[in-house]
Amino acid sequence: MWGAVAYRPPHHLGCCPSDEAAQDRSDAGDRDEGQDRGAEAALAHHSGHQGAAGEPDEQRGSERQREEQRQKQRRKEERKDHKEARASTVDPQARIMKMADGSFRPAYNVQFKTAAEGAHIVGVSVTDCGSDHGLLEPALDEIKQRYDVRPKRVLADGGYTSKDDIEKLHALDIELFSPLPKSKGDPAAPKRGDKAGTIAWRQRMASDDGIALYRRRFATERPHAHMRNHGLRQVLVRGKEKVKAVVLWHVHAFNFLQFKRLNLA
């Protein structure tokens, strides 16, 4: 039996712009606005020549208003382009992810596979996916590849519970223990679109035995607390492979201490 929980470094990988860079962007914005005003003045002067040829004043004024509106809209769109990017400019492999405090920062999604017996880590992966949906099956494949065995029961937090994941584990004859979503009515009652695996999962998590078994997952949170307390709060390298190398150092240190604590070393 093993538990899977996601860990995202709380600090972003990007860097804040310096004051000089900010001033350069401000000066560039002022030059763009000056060019826009110059273009508007040239257009107005050009419209005056058209008026000399006999164009009505009302038509000239309407054209100037439309052009001014187009210029304003273009400046607004340019300002929108300067909003925060969705990927880090320092590490192109990092992605903007939602943090525990509700903010969005460039980060990696580090996945630990932890044995419920002994609470030691048996698998590690690093992804750039901000969601945990779809990661259960690859986790089981990693365990199969490493140890030539598949667990019969999986304890996972609510972030992993998509119906596709539940059905895939059910097809492999693996029982998933994950909390039922909060909803109106009875969460254990079958919902429209539920298949056999989802129905069995709802019934399993509504039972006293299922709830008692799921409580064992909290022991698998120990590695996260240990690594945070020993410095894994910010990743100072770039790229998934290097991030994984840093995480593996922490994993080995934790496992050695855990084996010693359990008199297994």
Image (cartoon, rainbow, N blue to C red):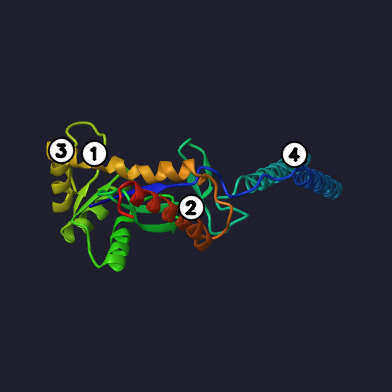
Residue at 44% across / 57% down in the picture?
126
Mark 1 against mark 4, which lies toward the viewer? 1
Most extreme residue toward the top, as rendered?
Answer: 184
Mark 1 against mark 2, which lies toward the viewer? 1
Residue sitting nearer the eye, 252 or 64: 252
Callout 4 amino acid: Glu
Q: Which residue is mark 3?
A: 206
Q: Position of residue 97 (x, y in %)?
A: 48, 47
Mark 3 against mark 1, which lies toward the viewer? 1
Q: Position of residue 102 (x, y in %)?
A: 48, 36
Which label is found at residue 175?
Answer: none
Q: State the CA–CA distance, disc 4 to disc 3.
A: 74 Å
Question: Disc 2 on helix, strand or loop?
Answer: loop
| First in sequence: mark 4 vs mark 3 | 4
> Residue 188, can we see it?
no
Q: Which residue is mark 1?
A: 215
Residue sitting nearer the eye, 164 or 263: 263
Quarter where residue 180 is shown: top left
Tag 1 near tag 4, CB within 8 Å: no
Asked if residue 215 is positioned above or below residue 32 in the image, the reply reads above
